[in-house]
Image (tube, rainbow, N blue to C red):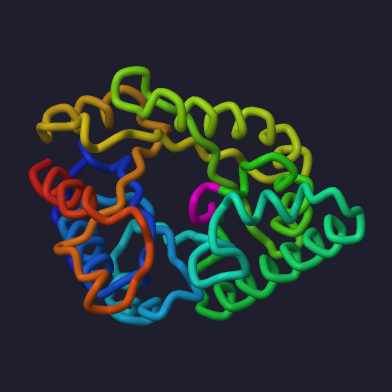
Amino acid sequence: MIQTKPNPIAKGLSADDWGMSPSVNQGILQLARRGVLKKVSLLINAAFASNGLDELRDIPGLTICLHVSFTFEGLFPSPRALMSALHAPSARRRAETRRVLRGEFLRQSERFSALGLGMNEFDSHHHVHLFPGMASILAQAGERAGFQAVRILRRHERFSRPFRDRALEAFSKHSESTYAAAGLRLAPALLVDSSRLREAAQLRALLLQDAGTAVLIHPATEDDFDRVGCKDAYREPRVHEFQLALRL
């Protein structure tokens, strides 16, 4: 079994996007081995989902969650396209979109369950599980799949993006009662804009504020997206986030 370096200060860090690229996996794995991470979210349909996964799952005390994707190598090219389909003028198209989303969620959940990682918690790429209309589709499906918890979002007044993160927090609060009614525990996570975090001490201070709230990061050891053909738009901050977490 892999021995991790105790790091109680950093026990609230949660890393997204395992499977997106080799450098993303390597960044997450390095931080997990140092005892820096509490949770990792896995893109089950991503090209590199299995790369290093056996090593990751052997790290004690680490929770691996399902990072459901409808917008990364998935059904829709963007969150905007997903919302356009879900709230289309045509009732038939709206119903078909709901059916497709529910089915895709269950398929990804089944693949995740087959890995034997435990049905601990799910979230989603671009946080779309919290967008208007999504909780009514996924809450019962999440309970049916056997998940215990769902990620919800909070923002930090100083270290968040003022407009985008405010909207995401509002979406989250609106959806929470639907998820809770399905029997899912609400697992809060803090949105931060890493460009506003210049020092590891600032990240450390966030972690000390609320031990029950995870702080989201998207680490990578380098930008290898062009080399592996990854089209995700969030790329430049990843190395910075990795280096900040490494200095905790």
Q: Nearer the viewer, residue 226 or 30?
A: 226
Q: Residue furthest front?
A: 89
Q: What is the total number of numbered labels drawn onto the structure image?
A: 0
Residue 34 visible in the current orientation: yes
Q: Is residue 40 left or right of residue 78?
A: left
Q: Is residue 113 above or below residue 93?
A: below
Q: Residue furthest right?
A: 91
- Give the quarter of the image for residue 41: bottom left
**Residue drawn 62% across the image and 42% down it:** 130
**Residue drawn 34% across the image and 76% down it:** 53
Residue 121 visible in the current orientation: no
User: Which span is picked out in magenta?
Assistant: 123-127
Q: Is residue 111 magenta?
A: no
Measuring from the top left, give residue 56's x and y in whole percent.
30, 70
Q: Is residue 201 above or below residue 136?
A: above
**Residue drawn 12% across the image and 29% down it:** 201
Q: Is residue 219 left or right of residue 216?
A: left
**Residue drawn 67% across the image and 34% down it:** 176
Q: Is residue 37 above or below residue 169?
A: below
Q: Quadrant of the N terminus?
A: bottom left
Q: Nearer the viewer, residue 178 or 127?
A: 127
Measuring from the top left, give residue 220's x and y in whole percent.
21, 60
Measuring from the top left, give residue 121's x and y in whole percent.
55, 54
Q: Is residue 82 left or right of residue 11?
A: right
Q: Quadrant of the C terminus?
A: top left
Q: Nearer the viewer, residue 226 or 248?
A: 226
Measuring from the top left, give residue 93's x and y in whole percent.
84, 60
State whether the magenta stretch is mostly helix, strand or loop: helix
